Image (cartoon, rainbow, N blue to C red):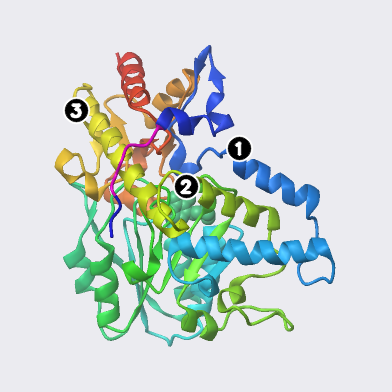
Amino acid sequence: MRAQASPLDVSALRAHFPGLARMVAGRPAAFLDGPAGSQVPESVVFAMGRVMRDLAANTGGEFITSRGIDELVESAREAAAEFVGGTAREVAFGLNMTTLSFQLAHAVARTLAKGDEIVVTDLDHDANISPWLTVARDRELVVKRAPIRAADGTLDLDGLESLLGPRTKVVAFTLASNALGTVPPARRITDAAHRVGALAVADAVHFAPHRRLDRTAVGADAVLCSPYKFFGPHAGLLSIREDLAASLPVDRVRPASEEPPGHRFETGTPSFEALAGICAAIEYIAALGSGASRRERLDSAFARIEAHEAALSRRALARAAELPGARVHGITDPARLAERTPTFCMTFEGRTARSVSAALGERGVFTWWGHYYAIAVMEALQLQSSGGGLRAGFLHYNTLEEVDRLFEELADILR
Ligand SMILES: Cc1ncc(COP(=O)(O)O)c(C=O)c1O
């Protein structure tokens, strides 16, 4: 059941993030660079430091610190499963999303035959496109690209479905665009993939800090995300259907354990301190909600996050509409906020995204510029050759005042 969305106490939760206290030119910094990496709560920093200070050991030893690491790994799998959906046995930790995506693509490709087809989308970050292009080149597979509609930055679902057929083996798509914020209807895509017997692989990197993620509810066979986008450390996270994880021919060293199946994707010794940080980040998010179990608290936390972020989006779209010479690419209709995250790609008449982002940076407003590895999006919007867009990406710790400040600074810079 969907939890009631009571408001987030944003000023209280901001106190958990030491990074948010940074000042630039005598004013507090405004961190609108969340889609490239979020700020980190003190509890995450503490948990990581504690492992390095008190539990520096490897797994499987017959002594107390090693047993502590065994327990840590188990609880990290449990927390990650509650965060991404599926079970603890279906979780794999990695270096980052991109590395796990290449590993998954290589393993899946070994099961495919020449001429088999993979569908990717123009809405995706390149980390869910290039791995499939790479294996396709190596194994003579065919890659088809589902287009987006330039007018509102949404995925052309009829176009995607028209690409599917008996030879489609994988549909790789995103749960949310890191460039435009678009949130496509994931269930329609996974259902379409499964109707033709293909695997549905979802990139949840941009989605994860904004919406409640549940691989099984979405119907994906695998989802990938990055804890450093949801207030945790730099690492990657994969949730993959247990039978698929157990059967794929992944690269392994010989005595490596086959159990749990997700572990088959983990090569070498993981960053145990990152695992502790991931647990703490998930605990931080859960504590924003209410409920008896961590899963329920996560449900409730994301209902609150979504409501606050919708208010940020509504304000940003209204302010952008009043800014002469500025254009927001993607969904701009305030009635369609359920279809987007508060991530805004903007261009400006007569100014490059880079020059505007640099001017904002000097004033303490941190945005991004360029393609942000969403190269297919930039090409579809015909922005790639002019230096891409400026991205202002809000997270739950951002405020309405920061939205106003962005647009006041922009008005001044563009004047
Ligand atoms: C939507 C999306 N997918 C994938 C990635 C790649 O993630 P990682 O840096 O963990 O490899 C990013 C990183 O920005 C992203 O935004």
Tell me which amino acid carries mark 3: Ala
The N terminus: image quadrant:
bottom left
Of residue 240 and residue 74, the one placed in the foreground of this image is 74
The mark nearer the N terminus, 2 or 1, is 1
Mark 2 or mark 3, whichever is nearer to me: 2
Crowding around mark 3 (Cα neighbors within 10 Å: few <14, some 14 to 19, many 20+) is: few
Q: What's the distance in space between the residues labelled 2 and 1, CA to CA? A: 13 Å
Above or below, 94 against 227 in this view is below
Q: Residue 91: x and y, percent? A: 53, 69
- Residue that protrudes farthest toward the right in the picture: 63
Residue carrying label 1 = 42
Q: Residue at x 48, y 68 (%)?
A: 239
Residue carrying label 3 = 321
Q: Is residue 354 visible?
A: no
Crowding around mark 2 (Cα neighbors within 10 Å: few <14, some 14 to 19, many 20+) is: many
Q: What's the distance in space between the residues labelled 2 and 3, CA to CA? A: 32 Å
- Residue that protrudes farthest toward the front in the picture: 292
Above or below, 50 against 130 in this view is above
Callout 1 secondary element: helix
Label annotation for residue 285: 2
The C terminus: image quadrant:
top left
Q: Is residue 153 magenta?
A: no
Q: Residue at x 64, y 54 (%)?
A: 276
